[in-house]
Every structure is written in structure tokens, then in C-alpha cells.
Amino acid sequence: MTNRQITVAELPKGALKPEHFTLSEAEMPTPGAGEVLLRVILMSIDAANRSWLQGATYRAAVRQGDAMPTYAICEVVESKSDRLETGDIVASEATWSDYITAPAHKVQKMPKVSPLSHLISLYGIAGKTAYHGLMSIGQPEPGQTVLVSAAAGSVGGFVGQIAKALGCRVVGIAGGPEKCAWVKQTLGFHECIDYRADGLFKAIRAACPEGVDIYFDNVGGEILETALNLMNERGRVVCCGAISQYQSTAPTGPRNLPGAVVVKRLRMEGFIVTDFVAEDAKAVRALQALTDAGHITVTEDIVEGLENAPHALIGLLNGDNKGKRMVRVSADPS
Ligand code: NDP
């Protein structure tokens, strides 16, 4: 058996390109004592992958020559640990590879939900990030207005649907008229604004006639600056990510800080999804109940083939995806 692996050929400066990665044949890994050999089934493709190439974040920076890290759903194909058996489905830190080994105590055994892709979308980092950020930091109340950027993406799409189910007015921001129409029709947002068109401030003001109570920020930069100017007093700004800055060689922050925060008594708080791990089970139950009740439509964007992982990530950064992007490396076990 051979094992393919994608490594970082060169760290990007500016826009990510295919030549920043190399696909090669790697040694088939062998599990040591206490380890498992895992067949990678699905890899999560996340905006954060790009920020890991930029420098140390909440995790160590990726270096030239490293296998590209990812979060993946895998099947145990060989176990040298009492904790796991062949055939178990697990979530694991992984690399862009066909097979990896991992210490059994570092992987999480998962239920065999169908389809397995829901372990990455609805019940994965995307769903949990949306739930925890909105509920714990945004603290929505019925009748309030929730504005969310990257609304056609995975986190943003879930945020809007959860907020709508709670009785909020939900306004998205996304790139292009076609995506905005999809956000309204498929995800049920009340409005969606095309940030690539002129007049963002006026468009948000028109879509949020009673102001913005919660801004769920996935993008940072100019959109964050504009949203801050439209917040209501005592509003909450949920700082989830800053995708508009990850590829920039000269990142810019909003210019109206701390002014807008002080004058409007805003609360602006960042978080990492793992901060709320103690409440993950509650989040999963709530996401399942909302989906069963028809409040959440799970949208997934699955790119086939390990070799297409670089294009999948580059495309996500350019806004090609609708819903949770992932790469299928091998088939779900039947
Ligand atoms: P998404 O599925 O949301 O895809 C990213 C989307 O961002 C693209 O589809 C694109 O849509 C939009 N985008 C790209 N560039 C820009 C730009 N310059 N300005 C505005 N929008 C842009 O990706 P993820 O779900 O992986 O990530 C969404 C955000 O959530 C990221 O900021 C990420 O870092 C963050 N995140 C944070 C976590 C945490 O624990 N805090 C955990 C997981 C994610 P469009 O066509 O609309 O431009």
C-alpha cells in the first residue's frame, strides 16, 4: 500500500497558490504501541488553515516541508491500543494524507452518524463554532437583529439559521448577488447584502432598520468597521475570525476603535471554539433538535480527492464555497 501526502512546498506571502503545495508518495506509516493507523475519510477545509501558514496562532505555525495539518474524520484500520478497535470512526488532528498514525488517547471516537460528513459540518467545528459564539457571546433575544458576515460559508450559514429559529431578524453579508439570493432562499435569512457592491453602509442600514444588536464577525477589516458604525447601544460583536486579512501582506483593522465601542457601550469578544468544549454535548443536542425541527438546512460543499485539497482551500479563500467545504479522501465505510 502506498500513502500519498501533501506538504507545504513554500510558505505563501499574499495569495495562496497551488505551487505552495507538493503531492508526493510517502512511507506507509506504522502504528507504535498505544497508536492507531487511520484511513482518512474526510478532511475539513477551513479558513483558519490559511492563517496557520501565516504564523503562530492558537496553534504552532506550519513550516516549509511540513505535511499540511487538518482536522479529519477517519476509520481505524489497525489498532495497537485497548482504547480503539479496527472499524471505529474517529475525529483526529491529521495531515493532508491518505493514512496517518496517531496516539489513541489523542483521537476522539465518534458515533457512526449518516452521512459521516455531518461530523464535520453540523456536529463539527462549523456547527459548534456557530452555536457557542452566538449563544455564549452574542446572547440573542427574540426580536433582536443579528448581522453575520461570510453568511454563505459554513459558520455564518449556521449562525443565521440558529438566530432565526430563536426569533431574531437575520441579515447576512456575502459576496455577489447569486450567493446573496442563495442565502435568502436556501438558508432562509431575511436579507443578505452583497459586500462587493457599492454602498455597504447604506445597504446594511436599510436591511437593519432597527439597528444591529449582534454582529457575528467572520471577516474583520472594512466590513467590521462598517458594522461597528451601525451597532445599537449595548450591542455585542462576536469576533469569530478575520478571513479578509489572512492573505493580506498589510492587514488593516477597523479605524473606529475604541470610539464606537466606548460611545455605544459595545461588548466585543473573541473566542476559539475549544473554549466551550465543556458545553459541546449541549451544542450537539441543540443543533440536532433544530435540524430535526426543520430550522437548519445542512449545506455541504464536498471536493473529491486528496489531490484537490490545495484547490479546495484556495477556492474557499476566494469564496467558491457554499456551506461547509471539505475534501473526500476515501469512501465512508459501508
Ligand atoms: P467559510 O465556509 O465561511 O468560507 C469562507 C468564506 O469567507 C468564503 O466563502 C467567502 O465568501 C468569505 N470571504 C473570503 N474572503 C473574504 C473577504 N475578503 N471579505 C469578506 N468575506 C470573505 O469558512 P470557515 O467556516 O472556515 O470560516 C469562517 C470564519 O470563521 C473564518 O474567519 C474562520 O477563521 C472562523 N472560524 C473561527 C473559529 C473559532 O474557533 N473562532 C472556528 C472556525 C472558523 P464570500 O463569497 O461571501 O466572500
Image: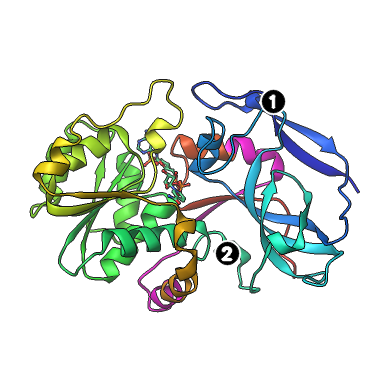
Q: Could you tell me the amino acid type at mark 2?
A: Leu
The image quadrant of residue 203 is: top left
Query: Which element carries disc 2, helix, strand or loop?
Result: helix
Front-most of residues 82 and 312: 82
Q: Determine whether, in the image, residue 169 is placed left or right of residue 275.
A: left
Crowding around mark 2 (Cα neighbors within 10 Å: few <14, some 14 to 19, many 20+) is many
Q: Determine whether, in the image, residue 229 is placed left or right of residue 319.
A: left
Return the residue at label 2.
119
Residue 209, percent across and down?
8, 52
C-alpha gap between disc 1 and disc 2: 30 Å
Q: Could you tell me the amino acid type at mark 1?
A: Ala
The image quadrant of residue 76 is: bottom right
* Picture residue at 77% right of the left edge, 71% below the top: 83
Labelled pair 1, 2 in contact (Cβ < 8 Å): no
Return the residue at label 1.
9
Residues in magenta, as a range: 287-311
* Picture residue at 39% right of the left edge, 43% below the top: 241
Q: Residue 251 in magenta?
A: no
Front-most of residues 241 and 165: 241
* Picture residue at 13% right of the left edge, 49% below the top: 265
